[in-house]
Amino acid sequence: MVVPVPYILVDGKKMVMPKPKIFLYRQMVAFSEKEKNGELNGDELFDAMIEIIAVAFDNKEITKEVVEKNLPMEDLSAIFLHIKAHVEGMAMLKASQFPNVKTPMGKR
């Protein structure tokens, strides 16, 4: 399933997420493992989500500080989950193009 491309508004300007890079995927896998193992407390969880959002947009204009200043609190989880679904969907789509290969994160 392909999820629409995520975007955020920075100073009123719509910033669209580019195609995900391997670095982003690796960070998301590491985040999932830490979260699953209960290794992230409240502040660490926020910081990790904000970092992943900044990495996802791969743009010098979108830093952790810019995300913190421009993204409403109630949108943090929503945009993070949107990015996660988009990246996982793209990874599964690519993996499905190879016969007899297990898809990323063990999904079929």
Image (tube, rainbow, N blue to C red):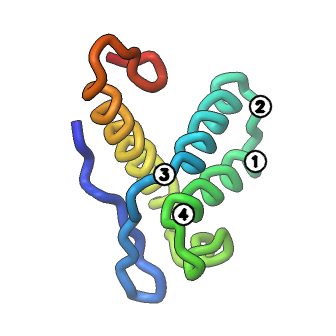
Q: What residue is disc 2 on? A: 39
Give how far apart the Cα atoms at labels 2 and 3 are: 18 Å
Q: What residue is disc 4 on? A: 73
In primary-sequence order, the first of circles 4 and 3 is 4
Give how far apart the Cα atoms at labels 2 and 4 are: 22 Å
**Residue neighbourhood size for the residue with mark 2, other residues' Cα within 10 Å, grouped as few (<14), some (14–19), many (≥20):** few
Q: What residue is disc 3 on? A: 80
Q: Position of residue 43 (x, y in %)?
A: 75, 51
Element type at mark 2: loop
In primary-sequence order, the first of circles 2 and 3 is 2
Asked whether the beta carbons under mark 2 and mark 4 sit within 8 Å of each other, the answer is no
**Residue neighbourhood size for the residue with mark 4, other residues' Cα within 10 Å, grouped as few (<14), some (14–19), many (≥20):** few
Give how far apart the Cα atoms at labels 1 and 2 are: 9 Å
Q: Position of residue 30 (x, y in %)?
A: 66, 35
The kind of residue on which mark 2 rests is: Glu
Q: Position of residue 5 (x, y in %)?
A: 30, 58
Give the quadrant of residue 89.
top left
The kind of residue on which mark 4 rests is: Met
Give how far apart the Cα atoms at labels 1 and 4 are: 15 Å
**Residue neighbourhood size for the residue with mark 3, other residues' Cα within 10 Å, grouped as few (<14), some (14–19), many (≥20):** some
The residue shown at (59%, 78%) is: 60
Give how far apart the Cα atoms at labels 3 and 1 are: 14 Å
The kind of residue on which mark 1 rests is: Glu
The residue shown at (41%, 70%) is: 8
Classify 11 as above or below 38.
below
Q: Position of residue 17 (x, y in %)?
A: 40, 64
The kind of residue on which mark 3 rests is: Phe
Quadrant containing the C terminus in the rendered view: top left
Q: Which mark is residue 44?
A: 1
